[in-house]
């Protein structure tokens, strides 16, 4: 997961935060949240695959796990006093849009599944394919006769809401993701929190998809398609920000 841009067009604001207790490593490129569960905590935690409540932003570096009484080094970046072992850099812009790879399943870098059309559909509406494309999903042409790179949303019974502009042919190949831009129910992240589990049922995880980068076979769309998302439950999202 990486910073793409800010909706307001401003620069990135980066702050250092302590990690929660040093017992758990914190990775780079993952959502970071305030530790609200630990009494008197001044630290931050990684989010989970489905929850990023009290979000602070996206981490830029990693911090090693350590519960030692004295720590003289680490990978958390530079601080003026040299105590960098328990701090992590976080992009805190409330309007930050992050770019995350669409992934098939919970394990990072698993190629998206190809759904193969079983019959011709001259109306351009019915996606009768194997595996079946999910209802209310974003679908796009991956390796087709005439619909490569064209994006639609599915409704029930493998029907797209708006017809594809060209005939659907037998053996056309599709890719799909069970989410759409603007939904207030966000996608599930992969286990390491760096990518999006494209075909897990959406769950309220406090991200909204702003837009997609969806590629066909010419750009290796199975391994090179992305969701761009904004964190909606942000700790700094409502302190009197004026557009």
Image (cartoon, grey):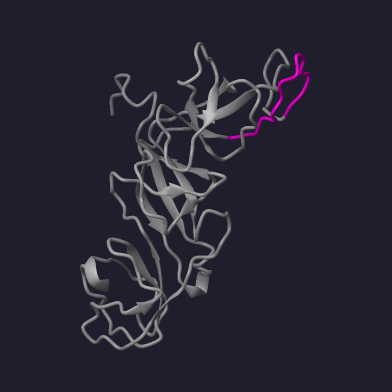
Q: Which of 60 and 202 is in front in this view?
A: 202
Q: Is residue 154 toward the left or the right of residue 146 in the image?
A: left
- Image position of 69 with respect to 184: above or below: above
**Res 43 seen here:** yes
Q: Is residue 202 toward the left or the right of residue 193 in the image?
A: left
Q: Which of 225 and 10 is in front in this view?
A: 225
Q: Does the magenta stretch include residue 73?
A: yes
The number of numbered discs placed on residues in the rendered structure image is 0
**Res 159 seen here:** no
Q: Does the magenta stretch include residue 184?
A: no
Q: Residue at x 49, y 13 (%)?
A: 39
- Image position of 212 with respect to 82: above or below: below
Residue 210 image position (x, y, % from top left): 34, 48
Residue 211 image position (x, y, % from top left): 36, 52
Residue 98 image position (x, y, % from top left): 46, 43
Q: Is residue 176 toward the left or the right of residue 123 in the image?
A: right
Q: Which residue is drawn at 38% across and 23% down?
A: 236
Residue 86 image position (x, y, % from top left): 66, 21
Predominant SS of the magenta segment: loop
Q: Residue at x 77, y 23 (%)?
A: 73
Q: Give the range drawn in magenta.
A: 60-74
Q: Is residue 177 toward the left or the right of residue 88 in the image?
A: left
Quadrant of the rendering where the C terminus is positioned: top left
């Amino acid at each position: 997961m990486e910073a793409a841009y800010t909706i307001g067009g401003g620069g990135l604001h980066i702050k250092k935060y302590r990690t929660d207790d040093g017992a758990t490593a914190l990775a780079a490129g993952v959502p970071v949240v305030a530790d609200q569960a630990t009494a008197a905590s001044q630290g931050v935690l990684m989010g989970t695959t489905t929850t990023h409540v009290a979000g602070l932003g996206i981490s830029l570096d990693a911090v090693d796990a350590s519960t030692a009484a004295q720590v003289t080094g680490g990978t958390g970046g530079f601080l003026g006093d040299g105590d960098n072992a328990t701090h992590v850099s976080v992009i805190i812009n409330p309007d930050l849009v992050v770019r995350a790879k669409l992934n098939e399943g919970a394990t990072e870098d698993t190629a998206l599944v190809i759904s193969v059309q079983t019959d011709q559909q001259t109306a351009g509406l019915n996606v009768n394919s194997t595996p079946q494309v999910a209802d209310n999903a974003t679908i796009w042409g991956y390796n087709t006769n005439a619909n490569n790179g064209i994006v639609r949303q599915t409704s029930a019974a493998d029907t797209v809401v708006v017809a594809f502009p060209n005939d659907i042919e037998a053996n056309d190949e599709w890719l799909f993701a069970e989410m759409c831009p603007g939904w207030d129910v966000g996608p599930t992240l992969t286990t390491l929190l760096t990518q999006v589990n494209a075909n897990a049922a959406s769950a309220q995880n406090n991200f909204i998809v702003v837009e997609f980068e969806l590629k066909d076979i010419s750009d290796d769309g199975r391994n090179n398609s992305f969701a761009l998302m904004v964190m909606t439950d942000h700790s700094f999202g409502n302190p009197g920000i004026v557009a």
